[in-house]
């Protein structure tokens, strides 16, 4: 079944094929064949099935207003298929493929008998889930422990300056739901460039040739991780303790040695001494080959050389180990004459070969002595003027920069990242340009929160899943203010709330800290997944200056650290002046530097970062405890699926506890494996993954409490 046969039918839909295909791609659906779920649900198999793509196209045409069934019926004008079209509409709506985000229009969906759902956490995953549940007819309340919404989307604003301290980049266009929401709220986006310059430790810009060479070697090393890992980890015990960092370091050690050797020869060959050495070496090789060929000829033709010790050298494979008494002999004219006793051609030929070999060996001996003398001169030159710092330091630092960049992609030291499966989500990255939001990412979360019941300063302490409801134990902080508006006192108020279902959207770090008590306990597999899956850390330092002194047209640039400095300390800078017209840089700290930053005082940060507005401390935040997830040593990609699975009171009862967040989205988790490189900017970030997980959780709640199956149609 091809795209043309599936999505084009003038008798059913009047939209052009190109628009239907684009709608499928924007909705993360294959345009040529239905998904396995769609085949099972709707038995999609005829040209009339273009309804699913037509409805998607109608929504994408006008995402500012709710798509209604009446509008669809006017475009898909086959009356016989009205019930079928309505069934498709319900499917798309419940899966958040249409009518999601921020739009206008009166909601005509019947309430689900006013089923109550509590969403824990007002990050983008929780907000997206709550908004879709409201759209699907549920009574929704959001509980947020902090005094603000957004979670790990947090925009700093002061005196006209805007800086995103968490999620910042809209990564990819095709299929990215964040792009749709940005369009709905008219969010101004600035397209990011595709090249990242890297400055060396001495303040100079790395040459394009050296930069490209380092990146090429690093990518080759990274591409060899799987092969090298399988070879090294044949021992099962070793396999358990082997990390991505171990393998990358092992490969790059070889790369560094190769690069140093290559460049050492390149430098030495520019000297007259080395040219002599090379010439001498070539003559040695030529003489060695001359001897080998004649000795081999004698063996192949059964010619017995008159010199018994020559025969011992016939199979000598190393020309530098040729050793016969002829090395001590002197050339003389008589050696070229045939003795009078020679009576046969065979004897004459053997004597000639022996004489030729004797002469060549004498010359070889002389050249070997000459070679050793020149080599000593070269070694003396190298020792007097060490080349390692001159040739390898910049290259090595660039390799280190790429390692740090990979740590940024995983929000963790490479020694903590699993070598197998660390890049399992590579094939799901959204294609197209990347953008930065000029007004701050919190514009998205604020828009999603509009019209929702959000209760701030309410920390959830426990969740009890019963057979017919869920009880949520909360501790709410009540603030009182004095006449000057300053916080004078705060009181804590505990309360138990009940709901038909709960959607838990707290970060993985909160689950790891056991901040919430569950009854019954989470399953053994889910507990293990929480413990094993990594949760990394990235911090930012926001810098403000009087004027721009860096390249204005570069969206980001890298910086190599000096020896002895923490390699992930402000290793990269985002140029906010490009988008916001203010002299602001956002410096990224990753790896050990991200943790170290949280231990510094404000004064120490100021000393290290020149002028600054603020620095983040995501690990110290009790309601985040880090940045985003990664596949740690001992973990596996299936952990994402396990963490996403709903939970019930027992196997006999319907699920009532649902989970969302980037750590539950296997295809789009927090890890950014194709992050910024010297020549491209590929980033698979947390925001759209968290948003999609919220939509998925809303769909799961809807299906549990709306057991009516969609009408299906058998293939004719």
Image (cartoon, grey):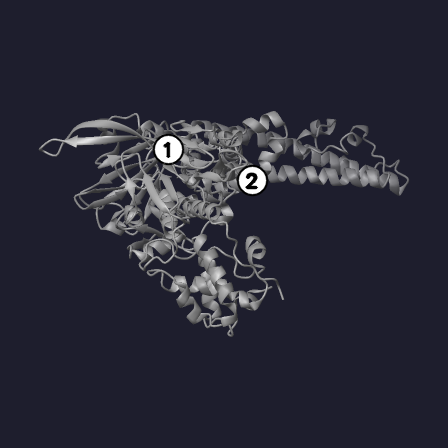
Foreground pick, 17 / 346? 17
Residue shown at 31%/29% (left/top)?
A: 597
Give the image quarter of residue 365. Answer: top right
Q: Which residue is mark 1?
A: 472
Residue 670 visible in the shown view: no
Horizontal arrangement in the rendering, residue 168 relative to residue 420 (left or right): left
Horizontal arrangement in the rendering, residue 208 relative to residue 635 (left or right): left
Foreground pick, 533 / 38? 38
Q: Residue furthest right?
A: 343
Q: Earlier in the sequence, mark 2 or mark 1?
A: 2
Could you say where residue 292 lies in the image, as x and y percent from the top left? Answer: 73, 38
Foreground pick, 526 / 599? 526
Q: Which residue is mark 2?
A: 224
Could you say where residue 636 lies in the image, as x and y percent from the top left? Answer: 53, 35
Answer yes or no: do the residues labelled 2 and 1 have beta carbons within 8 Å?
no
Q: Quadrant of the C terminus?
A: bottom right
Label 2 CA crowd tier, 10 Å (few <14, some 14–19, many 20+): some
2 or 1: mark nearer the eye: 1
Instruction: Indicate whether 471 appears above or below 140.
Output: above
Instruction: Indicate whether 241 appears above or below 347.
Output: above
In three-dimensional space, the C-alpha distance between marks 2 and 1, rounded to whole angstroms, equals 49 Å
């Amino acid at each position: 079944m091809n795209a043309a046969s599936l999505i084009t039918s003038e008798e059913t839909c009047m939209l052009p094929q190109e628009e239907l295909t684009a709608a499928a791609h924007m909705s993360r659906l294959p345009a040529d064949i239905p998904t396995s779920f769609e085949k099972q649900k709707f038995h999609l198999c005829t040209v009339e099935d273009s309804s699913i793509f037509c409805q998607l196209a109608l929504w994408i045409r006008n995402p500012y207003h709710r798509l209604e069934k009446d509008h669809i019926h006017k475009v898909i004008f086959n009356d016989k298929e009205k019930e079928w079209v309505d069934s498709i509409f319900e499917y798309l709506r419940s899966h958040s493929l249409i009518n999601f985000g921020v739009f206008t229009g009166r909601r005509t969906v019947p309430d689900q008998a006013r089923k109550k759902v509590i969403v824990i956490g007002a990050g983008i995953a929780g907000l997206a889930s709550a908004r879709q549940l409201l759209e699907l007819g549920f009574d929704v309340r959001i509980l947020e422990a902090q005094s603000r919404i957004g979670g790990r989307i947090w925009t700093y604003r002061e005196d006209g300056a805007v800086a995103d301290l968490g999620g910042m980049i809209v990564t990819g266009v095709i299929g990215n739901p964040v792009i749709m929401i940005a369009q709905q709220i008219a969010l101004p986006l600035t397209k990011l460039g595709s090249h990242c310059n890297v400055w060396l430790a001495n303040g100079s810009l790395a040459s394009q040739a050296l930069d490209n060479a380092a990146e090429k070697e690093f990518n080759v090393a990274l591409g060899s991780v799987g092969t090298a890992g399988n070879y090294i980890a044949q021992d099962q015990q070793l396999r358990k303790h082997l990390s991505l960092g171990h393998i990358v370091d092992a490969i790059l050690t070889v790369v560094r040695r190769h690069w140093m050797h290559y460049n050492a020869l390149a430098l030495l060959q520019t000297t007259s001494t080395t040219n002599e050495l090379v010439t001498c070496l070539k003559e040695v090789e030529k003489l060695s080959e001359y001897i080998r060929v004649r000795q081999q000829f004698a063996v192949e033709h059964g010619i017995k050389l008159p010199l018994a010790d020559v025969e011992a050298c016939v199979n000598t494979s190393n020309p530098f180990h040729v050793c016969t008494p002829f090395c001590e002999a002197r050339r003389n004219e008589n050696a070229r004459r045939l003795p009078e006793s020679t009576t046969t051609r065979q004897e004459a030929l053997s004597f000639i070969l022996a004489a030729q070999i004797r002469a060549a060996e004498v010359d070889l001996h002389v050249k070997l002595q000459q070679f050793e003398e020149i080599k000593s001169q070269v070694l003396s030159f190298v020792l007097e003027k060490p080349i390692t710092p001159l040739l390898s330091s910049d290259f090595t630092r660039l390799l280190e920069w790429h390692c740090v960049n990979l740590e940024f992609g995983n929000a963790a030291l490479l020694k903590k990242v699993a070598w197998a499966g660390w890049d399992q989500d590579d094939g799901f990255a959204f294609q197209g340009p990347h953008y930065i939001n000029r007004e701050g990412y919190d514009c998205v979360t604020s828009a999603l929160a509009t019209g929702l019941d959000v209760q701030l300063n309410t920390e959830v302490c426990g969740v009890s899943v019963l057979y017919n409801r869920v009880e949520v134990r909360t501790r709410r902080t009540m603030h009182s203010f004095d006449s000057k508006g300053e916080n004078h006192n705060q009181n804590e108020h505990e309360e138990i709330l009940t709901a038909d279902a709960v959607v838990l959207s707290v970060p993985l770090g909160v689950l790891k800290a056991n901040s919430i008590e569950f009854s019954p306990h989470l399953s053994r597999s889910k507990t293990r997944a929480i413990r094993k899956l990594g949760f990394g850390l990235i911090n930012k330092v926001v810098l403000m200056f009087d004027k721009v002194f860096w390249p204005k047209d570069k969206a980001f640039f890298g910086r190599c650290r000096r020896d002895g400095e923490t390699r992930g300390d402000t290793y990269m800078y985002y140029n906010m002046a490009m988008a916001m017209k203010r002299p602001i840089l956002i410096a990224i700290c990753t790896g050990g530097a991200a943790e170290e930053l949280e231990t510094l005082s404000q004064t120490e940060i100021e000393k290290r970062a020149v002028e600054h507005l603020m620095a983040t401390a995501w690990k110290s935040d009790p309601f985040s405890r880090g940045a985003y997830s990664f596949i740690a040593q001992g973990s596996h990609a299936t952990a994402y699926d396990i963490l996403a699975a709903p939970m019930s009171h027992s196997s006999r009862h319907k699920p009532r506890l649902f989970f969302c967040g980037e750590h539950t989205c296997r295809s789009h988790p927090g890890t950014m494996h194709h992050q910024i490189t010297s020549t491209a900017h590929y980033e698979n970030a947390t925001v759209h993954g968290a948003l999609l997980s919220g939509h998925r959780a809303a769909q799961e709640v809807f299906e549990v409490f709306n057991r009516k199956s969609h009408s299906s149609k058998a293939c004719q």
